[in-house]
Every structure is written in C-alpha cells, then in structure tokens.
Image (cartoon, rainbow, N blue to C red):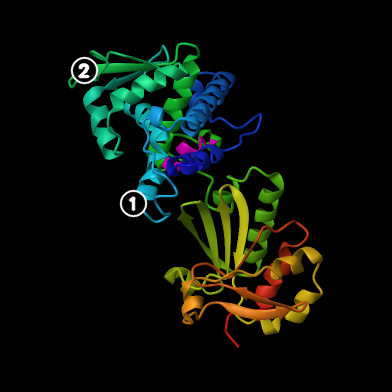
Amino acid sequence: MKYWIERWSQLRKKELMSYPNEFTIHDVYKTICTHEELKRGFEELYEILMHCYEDILNDPASMLLPIYDMNEYGYFSKEARASREESYKYAKIFYVLGYSGELNQNGKLCIQVDKLKEQCKALKITNINAFLNILSNYGIVAEGLINGKIKSNTNITISFPDNKNVIIALYILAVKSNNTNRFKDFCRLNYKLFESDWSTIEYGNSVDAVSDLFHSEQDRTVAQLIHNELISRNYYYNFQDWNEGPQIRYYKKESDRNRNANASFWLTSMDTELKFYFRITNMDKVLENIKNCPKSVISNFLVSDNGCANRISGSCVSGISYELNDNIIWRCGCCNPNFQVTPSIDDYIYYINAVEMAGNKKK
C-alpha cells in the first residue's frame, strides 16, 4: 500500500456492513416494490460500491482520486486528511444522486441539474460529469447529458437497466439517510435503515453504534457483554468518532462524561475490529490480582511500549511503569488510555475488575 487514498479506501470497503440473509423492511417501502425485489436491489448496490473500492485500491488515479505517498506525507498532514475525506467520494456521489432525484415508475431517478449542482457543492463534489462517466463502468446510466456534461436548467435521469431495483434501493437509502442525518450509515450501506419509516431511526443508540461494524460475531457478543457490565456498574457513556472508526467512552462520574474527560474505558472499532481501551494509574493495587488471572490476561499486561516524546523528554505525567513476572513494563497514557486489548468472552471481566480495583487516583 503506497498512497493514503488506498489506506482510507480500504477502510471504507471494510466498513460496508455485513448483512444477514433476511432483514426487516418496513411496509412503507413495500409500496414501491416487493420485499424480495428491494433486497435484491440492495445486494447488487452493495456489490457495485464494493467494486468501486476494489478499483480504487487497484488504480486510484483512474478513479480520479488524489494520490499522496504515505512515505512523503505524514499521518497528520493536510494531504493525509484530504485523502481520508476523498475516500468517501463515491459514497457521496451515490448519496447525492439518490436524494436529489425523484423516483419514477420505471425505476429511474429524475434529477434537476441545478439541484444536483447545489447538492454537489454542499458535499464538495467537483467534476460530477467525469464521475458519472466512471459510474457507467458499473452499469449505471446517466441520460440527458449534453456532450458528456450536465447543463444548467435541464434534467438528467439515472438508471440501472440490468436491475431497476438497484436505483430503488439507492433512492430509499439516500432519502432515509438524508432525512435522519445518517450519512455514514449510508456510506456503510447499513441495512437497518430499512427497518423503520422515512423519518425514524431505532438503532445506533447503544453498543451497536460500534459493534455493528465488527465482522466477527464473537467480537459483537463481547462488546455487548462489556457494555452491559459497565452499565450495570453505573457507568455513564457517550459516543465519539475518530479516523479509524466509532467508539463509546465510559465514565465513572456523570460530570466527567459531560466534560468528556477521564474516561475509564473506550470500546472502539479500530478498522472494524474490536479494541478495548482502559486506564489504570495505580498498578500497585492490582498486580497481585493480575498474577492470578488467566494467561491470556497476564500476557496483555506484559506488553510494554516505547512511550511518546514526553517520556523521552522526561516530562511525561501520564505513563506508568511496573514490574510483572520479572519484567519492567512501561505503558504510555498521554494520548489514549494506557492499556488496549482485544478481549474474549472468557476474559473481558478481568480487565474491568482490574480498573475498578485500582481506582482512578495515582499512588
């Protein structure tokens, strides 16, 4: 992997949500087509967007996306940030086509060009003509262009002749996402958008906001168990987002939650995989207990890191050092909680207990 656009487009591809063989579709959408027709349209739309990401990974320049070398531009550079945003480009194009148009009885989207231009500008989509041309490679047809370009004060139609239900699924997902401010759900082709009517969302307010992205059923189960356990222990939580995925942060005090400070735990989707972060500042209180934990738990407490620039300069106040099994361990805690693990069903409870046993004050 050479370019930042490849790195972030790979994540966008992984974030396309797994969907079950059967899922609920609200009756309001069945007035447009049948349950099975809409399901088949959704499945083919999913494949089209998947192929878009595969083609970006193979040749991003031909997909009209920027190519900034990862060795030349650092993670925090404006070029890397631009690449993250551009990795949503094709999802944005499908999105704006879907909610800008009116669906006709033939399964085509009729779009006023002036409205399309306005919506493209809002989403920072330029050169829509060229992208419409690329979409033709995937079977999507744009009619009404003049010399290959959209012209003001005209209309265009978007269709998928091989299966009109693809456009119907696109329309429903885009309009529903736009109505409910769920753009990233559209980008991930979240099948749960079909569960309720045009203006109602009944998911994503609990652990599923993170765990739905996991491709492992075991990880989804562990995440639910962790969430339930922390709620039973009266933790407060809020939702966060970072470049690699969404997260839930858990706080012992409501005031800390409101200030977004001193979270004891982070339950995260790291590139669609479960990562459980937790903070311990006083290891002396828990070392004897850790020694009696299962080997899978002990091994995670034996992992040391190099620390950040603050450790090198001697100004670190967040890192901790401790001795375990004759090993001296250093854990940095400046940017993130100082421990991160991928817990299993059998060991997640030990990490929660360790945090609570240690308390949140330094020795």
Task: Name the N-terminal-most of marks 1 and 2.
Answer: 1
Q: How many marks?
A: 2
Percent of width and height locating residue 280:
61, 76
Residues rendered magenta in the picture: 182-190
- Residue 157's place in the image compared with 314, above or below, is above
Q: What is the C-alpha distance between the residues marked 1 and 2? A: 37 Å
Residue 289 quadrant: bottom right
Eye-nearest disc, 1 or 2: 1
Q: Quadrant of the C terminus?
A: bottom right
The single residue placed furthest to the left in the displayed view is 153
Q: Amino acid at mark 1?
A: Lys
Say if the magenta span includes residue 186. Answer: yes
Horizontal side, residue 120 vs residue 254: left or right: left
Is 56 covered by the magenta stretch? no
Tag 2, which secondary structure? loop
- Up the image or down, 297 lies above or below 100; here it is below
Residue at point 62%, 80% (across, down): 321
- Whether 308 is drawn above or below 204: the answer is below
Which residue in the rendered view is the most extreme toward the front?
72
Residue at 27 percent across and 39 percent down: it is: 122
Q: Which residue is mark 1?
A: 78
Amino acid type of the residue that numbered disc 2 sits on in the rendered structure: Thr
Q: Is residue 56 left or right of residue 116?
A: right
Residue 124: percent from the left, percent from the top? 29, 39
- Residue drawn at 54 percent across, 26 percent down: 47
**Which residue in the structure is indicated by mark 2?**
154
